[in-house]
Amino acid sequence: MITYSIIIPVYNEEANLPEMYRRVVQVIEGLDGPAELVLIDDGSQDRSLAILDELHQRDPRVHYLSLARNFGHQIAVTAGLQYAQGEAVVIMDADLQDPPELLPQLIEKWRAGYHVVYAQRVSRAKESWFKKLMAYGFYRILNRFTDVTIPTDTGDFCLMSRQVVDILNSMPEKHRYIRGLRAWVGFPQTAVQFKRDPRFAGDVKYTFRKSLNLAIDGIISLSRKPLKIATYLGLITALVAIAMIILVLFWRIYNAPAQLIGYTLITIAIFFLGAVQLICLGILGEYIGRIYDEVKQRPLYTIKKAAGFDEISQS
């Protein structure tokens, strides 16, 4: 019976894997129960898969899945959740920004009765002021838009109980935002604060574009408030249009023709109405696109190779 599963998504992390393995093993050997490492190769193009295979041959606690292509971080984590067997499941990144040495503190909170123990950042080493500002604003805006409270300054680094993991695995949606879904599930949750280290080696994988897409996924998958905003924009636009009609009629009846009534006013109105329409269409398009993805019923991922699991199935 496995007590702890540690899920680590991997994408072009050949420079980090040996040190990550060393530090994780050093920690799990001091735990109060057997542990497994569930490593998910998300279509890496370097030697990451070969290193995972070497680690598996050396250590039977190391299991890995190799996805047939790059499906993205959240899908890789989802694959790990579906194959993890532990009573407590930890998610962490391979770049060692999530320190493995924090695991005993997460486990202590779980033993105290919490079903979700998330690691909350109090500082970010060697990150630009722009990235820190964007991260600060993102979590505050996210909580304004979503219907659940997502703890600020938290990532995917967390520990979840088997009960929570089973519920997450039962959710069929394609666009997954793990930190939002774990908040939606409920159950007692708490934080363990830590100082986030810089990457041990290699380049940052979460570019601004990927971070923006993840933010949109989080908002769209957890709330219908953007649709309400589109409705409010339509109402406001209608009120402005009515006010402009009244204003033009007033000028026509009580004043001589003015230059403002001509092309300038018409141009402003066209651009304003066009912008509002495009914004609303964009919001509707995001929701319709997700409906389109859901009704196709395609699997979340495909597996190229797997090692260390009793039964291999594609989900």
Image: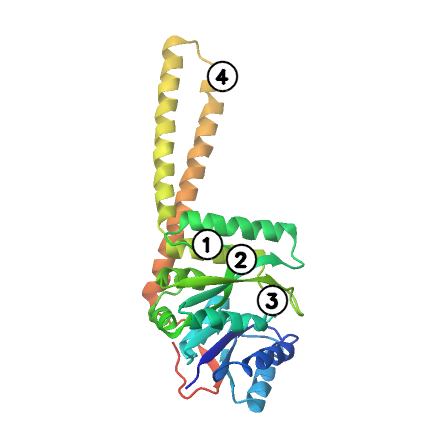
Tell me the mark number nearer the camera, choosing from 4 and 3.
3
Q: Secondary structure at mark 3?
A: loop
Evaluate if marks 3 and 1 touch, with contact meaning CB atoms under 8 Å apart.
Answer: no
Sequence-wise, the earlier of marks 1 and 4 is 1
Disc 2 marks a residue whose amino acid type is Ser
Q: Give the number of the mark in front: 2 or 4.
A: 2
Give the residue pinned by disc 1: 216
What number is the disc on residue 97? 3
- Asked if labels 2 and 1 touch by Cβ distance under 8 angstroms, the answer is no
**Decide: marks 4, 3 in contact (CB < 8 A)?**
no
Where residue 272 appears, x then y in whole percent? Answer: 45, 33
Which label sits in the foreground, 1 or 4?
1
The Cα atoms of the two marked residues, 1 and 4, are separated by 43 Å
Residue 44 % position (x, y) = 57, 75
Going from N to C along the chain, the mark reached first, 4 or 3, is 3
Residue where numbered disc 4 is placed: 259
What residue is drawn where x is 66% and y is 75%? 15
SS type, badge 4: helix
Mark 1–mark 2 Cα distance, whole angstroms, equals 9 Å
Tell which tag, 2 or 3, sits nearer the viewer: 3
Of callouts 1 and 2, the N-terminal one: 2
